[in-house]
Amino acid sequence: MNDRDVVAWARFSPEHMTSLAALERAYEKELHDEETERTTYMIDDKPSGRPIGWCVVRTWDRKHVSANVGISLGEKDLWGKGYGTEAMRLLLEIVFDHQGWHHAELWTLAENERAIKSFEKVGFRRVGIEREVAYYEGKYHDVVLMEQLKPEWDSRKGN
Ligand SMILES: CC(C)(COP(=O)(O)OP(=O)(O)OC[C@H]1O[C@@H](n2cnc3c(N)ncnc32)[C@H](O)[C@@H]1OP(=O)(O)O)[C@@H](O)C(=O)NCCC(=O)NCCS
């Protein structure tokens, strides 16, 4: 959570830092149902049981139509090996198949080609670009909004 490279991609802010205590407090809130708009999941490497990242569903849409999702592998040596795509597919099973959301969306930095490719592999499509809405390391960065509808998810599964 405090690795510059990870949080630059994940939070569009390499300076973002959090303490272990703050993290535990946030997770405790979720575990005690005091956090109603966010559920975070740990991503484990199954054979070793090693925690390698996290993914999240944010259900802040008051119309109960759209879920916002996010994902990050904190172990950089595991980037590009298929873990993220598999984890996002499992997260979308929760979002669409178990919870029945109609629409899923996410934001990612436009320069995050690995993430965009991974998200496209599980059915997300680019909606558009928000220009220069992130700022770090002395310059502005564009952000891509991506989305997917449940019928599209369903028909991909059927193929
Ligand atoms: C984004 C993230 C979750 C993707 O998970 P991952 O396990 O690394 O991705 P995958 O290996 O499943 O898929 C990546 C795809 O992009 C390709 N890829 C890898 N590096 C790439 C690069 N630099 N440029 C373009 N494509 C790249 C891979 O080849 C793969 O496609 P393929 O399976 O067709 O070969 C992970 O990289 C990560 O946590 N990154 C840091 C944090 C982050 O960016 N979070 C997302 C914020 S929205």
Image (tube, rainbow, N blue to C red):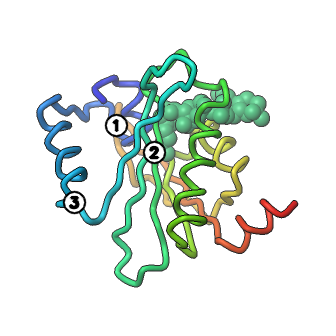
Foreground residue among 146 and 131: 146
Indicate the position of residue 55 as horizontal and vertical percent values. 44, 44
Left/right placement of residue 125 relative to residue 63 reads right
Instruction: Name the N-terminal-most of marks 3 and 1.
Output: 3
Left/right placement of residue 105 relative to residue 153 reads left
Crowding at mark 2 (Cα within 10 Å: few <14, some 14-19, many 20+)? some
Residue carrying label 1: 136
Residue at 49% from the left image edge and 60% from the top image edge = 130
Indicate the position of residue 68 as horizontal and vertical percent values. 45, 62
Point out the frontmost of discs 2 and 3. Answer: 3
Point out the frontmost of discs 3 and 1. Answer: 3
Q: Which mark is residue 141?
A: 2
Mark 1, secondary structure of its residue: strand
Q: Quadrant of the N terminus?
A: top left
Residue at 42% from the left image edge and 25% from the top image edge = 51
Q: Quadrant of the C terminus?
A: bottom right
Asked whether the beta carbons under mark 3 and mark 1 sit within 8 Å of each other, the answer is no
- In the rendered view, tell whether residue 22 sits above or below residue 88: above
Crowding at mark 3 (Cα within 10 Å: few <14, some 14-19, many 20+)? few
Task: Locate residue 79: give its quadrant.
Answer: top right
Asked whether the beta carbons under mark 1 and mark 2 sit within 8 Å of each other, the answer is yes
Instruction: Name the N-terminal-most of marks 2 and 3.
Output: 3
Residue carrying label 3: 33
